[in-house]
Every structure is written in C-alpha cells, then in structure tokens.
Amino acid sequence: MRYLLLISRGIDALNERLGWFANMLVLLACLISAGNAMSRYAFDLSSNAWLEIQWYLFAGMVMLGASYTLKVNEHVRVDILYVHLSERGKEWLDLIGTAVFLVPTMLVIAYYSLSLFTQSWAVQEISGNAGGLLRWPVKILLPLGFVLVALQGVSEIIKRAAALRGVVRYETHYERPLQ
C-alpha cells in the first residue's frame, strides 16, 4: 500500500502543477483579451489569431485544470446520497464510482478523442479564419486532459482504498455549491 500511496502522491503533485499552470492560463487569457481590446479600439488593429489564442487558452484551463479540480474534491457531483452518508460510506461511494464510472469513461473519451488530434496533426489543420492558428496544438489537450483526469481518478482510488484499510485518513468533506 505504501508503494501505491507513493504513486498517488506523484500523480497528485503532477496535477497540482498543472492546476497552477491552468490558473496562469486564466491570467494570460485576461491579459491577451485586454490587450486585444485595447489595440482594436485604440489603434484599430486586430487579428483572429488573438481571439483564437484566447479560445485555446480556455481549452487549456479546462482540460489541464479538471484533474486538479478532482484532486481538491471541487468537481461537480450528484450529492443526493453523498451528504447523508457516513465518512466510510463516502469513501466507498467515491472508490466504486471512480473505479466503475470515472476512470473507464475518461479513458474511452481519451481514446476516441486521440483520433481528432492525429487527423489534425496529419494534415496540419489550420483554422478557416483569416490569420487563424494551427488546430492540432489545442486538439492534443482533449486526450491529454482526459488521461490526466483518469490518472487522478487512479490516485483517488488508491487514497480511498488506503483510508478504508485504515492506513491513512482521507477528508471526504464536500461543500455543496451555493444555489
């Protein structure tokens, strides 16, 4: 179990770094958006590339930040049962739900989205907009993001299994979003 927990810590560390990077993409997107608006209104200069890079950055925020969101237990969940369960019940529900639904689903989506990237790479797909960007760099984020969520799911399974065996204490606290 110690070896598995070491793997879990490695996955967690990777996704924490990517979560930080996704946060920096938010800042970068805001700066680009402000700069683009300023250059458009002040100097009548603009480019579709500036708009597209904002979309690409948003894709990076979502696809690289999703695994971190799972790590910090801030993902959206159906909490009809979850809030009424004991700590042990929550650990079991997280373990089973992650192993049966999350990880397999993420891997299937990653597998099928890989062809979107490979096709785009093969033809060096470019945006149809004037001054548009290459498409394959953003399309690699799809399979990569889903694999990262699957990896974080594996980490969560390890942590829940360790908690159920009494090896570690895991915090199952989940705060419902304000409606």
Image (cartoon, rainbow, N blue to C red):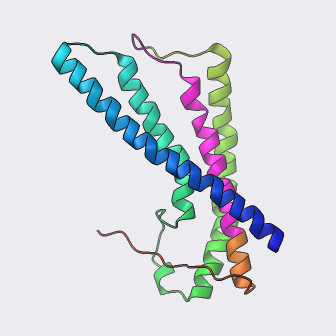
Q: Residue at x 33, y 15 (%)?
A: 47
Q: Is residue 31 above or below residue 91?
A: above
- In the image, farthest residue toward the left: 42
Q: Quadrant of residue 4?
A: bottom right
Q: Residue at x 64, y 83 (%)?
A: 169
Q: Which residues are magenta?
A: 129-157
Prevalent SS, magenta region: helix
**13 above or below 177?**
above
Q: Position of residue 83 (x, y in %)?
A: 46, 82
Residue 146 position within the rendered picture, expressed as x and y whole percent measured from the top left: 62, 47
Q: Is residue 159 magenta?
A: no
Query: Which quadrant is the N terminus positioned in?
Result: bottom right
- Residue found 24% across the figure and 19% down from its top: 39
* Residue toward you, 142 or 60: 60
Direction from residue 109 to residue 22 in the image, left or right: left
Say whether residue 153 is magenta. yes
